[in-house]
Image (cartoon, rainbow, N blue to C red):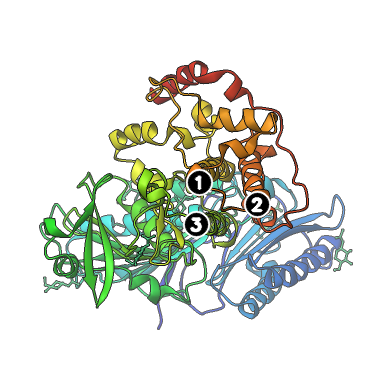
Amino acid sequence: MQRRCLAVHAVLLIAAIALPLAASQPWPLCGRNANYTAGSTYETNLQDLALTLRAKASSSPTLFASGTNGTAPNAVYGLLLCRGDVSSSDCFDCGSRVAQDDGQACNRAKDSALVYNQCYARFSDKADFLTSTYNTPEFQTTYLISGTNISSTDVAGYNRAVTEILNATVRHAVENSTRLFATGLRRGNDSGFRDIYSMAQCVPEMSSTLCRTCLDGLVGQWWNTFPRNGEGARIAGDRCHLRSELALFYTGDPMVLLQDVAPVNAEETVYQITNLPVDTTDDFESVKSTLLSLALLRLATDNFHESNKLGGGFGAVYKGILSGQEVAVKRMAKGSNQGLEELKNELVLVAKLHHKNLVRLVGFCLEEGERLLVYEYMPNKSLDTFLFDTEQRSRLDWSTRFRIIEGVARGLQYLHQDSQKKIVHRDMKASNILLDADMNPKIGDFGLARLFAQDQTREVTSRIAGTFGYMSPEYVMCGQYSTKSDVFSFGILVIEIVTGRRRNSGPYLSEQNDEDILCSVWRHWEERTTVKMIDHSLGRNYPEVEVVKCINIGLLCVQQNPVDRPTMADVMVLLNSDTTCSLPAPAPRPIYLIDGISGYSQTISQWSWR
Ligand SMILES: *[C@@H]1O[C@H](CO)[C@@H](O)[C@H](O)[C@H]1NC(C)=O
Ligand SMILES: *[C@@H]1O[C@H](CO)[C@@H](O)[C@H](O)[C@H]1NC(C)=O
Ligand SMILES: *[C@@H]1O[C@H](CO)[C@@H](O)[C@H](O)[C@H]1NC(C)=O
Ligand SMILES: *[C@@H]1O[C@H](CO)[C@@H](O)[C@H](O)[C@H]1NC(C)=O
Ligand SMILES: *[C@@H]1O[C@H](CO)[C@@H](O)[C@H](O)[C@H]1NC(C)=O
Ligand SMILES: *[C@@H]1O[C@H](CO)[C@@H](O)[C@H](O)[C@H]1NC(C)=O
Ligand SMILES: *[C@@H]1O[C@H](CO)[C@@H](O)[C@H](O)[C@H]1NC(C)=O
């Protein structure tokens, strides 16, 4: 395939060339200020550096290397960045071409940038570009056009489509790739421009914030730079790169997929997005399969029939049968389309979490304004329906309770540490612990609290009231969330499971003036009368040492300072430790308990005004 490529604009660029694209041909961008001579020390240092960078970049997982060789005045600075999808050996080959081409391509200019299809190299006698936050303006960026013109007459639609996939690709590179690299594909339905392929990449040593700024800048100048009907274009600089083509130019499955599904009307084009959270794309198919059609879910729930309704809360939940399997279909209130892409991202992420102590998300559907989440069906509902019901509570013997505590700890540990991405649940509470037919616990709604919060402000407010008792002080006071906030909520949950009492503390629920359950437990702990707090419905059928150990762990988890709280991995170790060992004692009663509810309620009302 011979494609015409053209460097259209570059500050200080010597050549604006239209050249046939030979695979190995570099597009050079050369400085004018200083040249070196053949056979000079500078040239030797440059060659040495090019070879060092080639070796380092091709053996690095980020396919990037930067460095220097020689000492002033012959010091040379350089970087080599291979396109994020190329193999180590292709990166090595591209690096070899850099070493060969550099002197000639730029007539021995000390400042040079070489852009290839598979890599980018930059050299200078000054180090500034290695630390700059943007593509350095004085020694600019390479702009390339490839292909010819699109055949579609809908140029505006094309521009929108390109901007859209570039935006999504940038977002993925910045937010979801540790290497700051993403590829994208937008499947279109216009015969004049069908599939649009994209790529965004930053030098991986940049912060994601700077990377975003850099790439957003390139998206912003895209249509000021390139003809609006051009087939493909690329901007390459020493900090970030952006590219869009009508032909596939990268290897592997796209990390971002936008699909232009037959529009219902011109105003409301529906996009399906499959935005893979990690750089490995092996499980692309498995993720795609979690998209379910609305028609299928209507069928599964008998068109959301009242008789299939399981419960309410945050949107209704219906029981359904999907391919012979019992499922729970959660139907979120219809909302604005804002945050829809974030929602989809998160759903794909959640769909990829697999752990026996997490409720499995079978799939989801985002059609016609509906937001439907399909989970495996949990016949024994949630922990709160047992724990906080006087009759049902007696059906939870100690071994079941301990199994629940352990299972929840395992599920949380997976979310925090073992899943591909560190996930903070943010809404750990008894009603989010679901129970299967054998009373094994599974954490539900993980990651979704955060996800639905965006456009459901009201729900969020009422949820604050409902789960106030589980919120860590740093969250209440500063709105700060971390895995240690989940650990706090876990601690409360453990104390509830042991005492059989709900922690109803907080400004909204304090009329009855009962002592906060947490205060009671702490007081009894200090007075060494902890056993008094154990749920009476357990009778005497429990191993006292183990139960006290659980209270000890619970108190460690609710310590004031997040740093003092154990991680979930620590909790697992403590839970499984020999009951005869003594556990670390929690720090003295935390200030948030001593100050009492009045101090707390002031903070929360302030906080909820934000
Ligand atoms: C460096 O070389 C280029 C191309 O040969 C030339 O145009 C430029 O004037 C030279 N610069 C200096 C500072 O000698
Ligand atoms: C420059 O490269 C040569 C050859 O790889 C190496 O021996 C030398 O130590 C390098 N110098 C510096 C300052 O890195
Ligand atoms: C491509 O479109 C531009 C307008 O953006 C026009 O000037 C040019 O002649 C077109 N080229 C071809 C080959 O059609
Ligand atoms: C792309 O992102 C920019 C900046 O975030 C935004 O202004 C623009 O509307 C987005 N365009 C599309 C088509 O999504
Ligand atoms: C593409 O458009 C055609 C005609 O408008 C339509 O029949 C077809 O379903 C569309 N395909 C997709 C994937 O939207
Ligand atoms: C992408 O990153 C953002 C921000 O870190 C996160 O909210 C989102 O869930 C991620 N999406 C995927 C698909 O990983
Ligand atoms: C849990 O559900 C199963 C299946 O529906 C049922 O047989 C069992 O009795 C339930 N367990 C409790 C403790 O209710």
Between the C-alphas of marks 2 and 1, the distance is: 13 Å
Q: Position of residue 245 (x, y in %)?
A: 38, 68
Q: Is mark 3 within 8 Å of ligand 6?
A: yes
Q: Position of residue 377 (x, y in %)?
A: 32, 65
The disc, 3 or 2, on the residue closer to the chain's N-terminal end is: 3
The disc, 2 or 1, on the residue closer to the chain's N-terminal end is: 1
In this view, the residue in front, 588 or 92, is 588
Judged from the image, the secondary structure of the residue bearing numbered disc 1 is: helix
Query: Which residue carries the number 2 mark?
Result: 546
Q: Please, is residue 55 above or below residue 135 in the view?
A: below
In this view, the residue in front, 576 or 223, is 576
In this view, the residue in front, 171 or 80, is 171
> Which mark's residue is nearer the viewer, 3 or 2?
2
Looking at this view, name the residue that lies furthest to the bottom. 1
The disc, 3 or 1, on the residue closer to the chain's N-terminal end is: 3
Looking at this view, name the residue that lies furthest to the front. 540
Between the C-alphas of marks 3 and 2, the distance is: 42 Å
- Quadrant position of the C terminus in the picture: top left
- Does residue 396 appear to the left or right of 422 in the view shown? left
- Quadrant position of the N terminus in the picture: bottom left
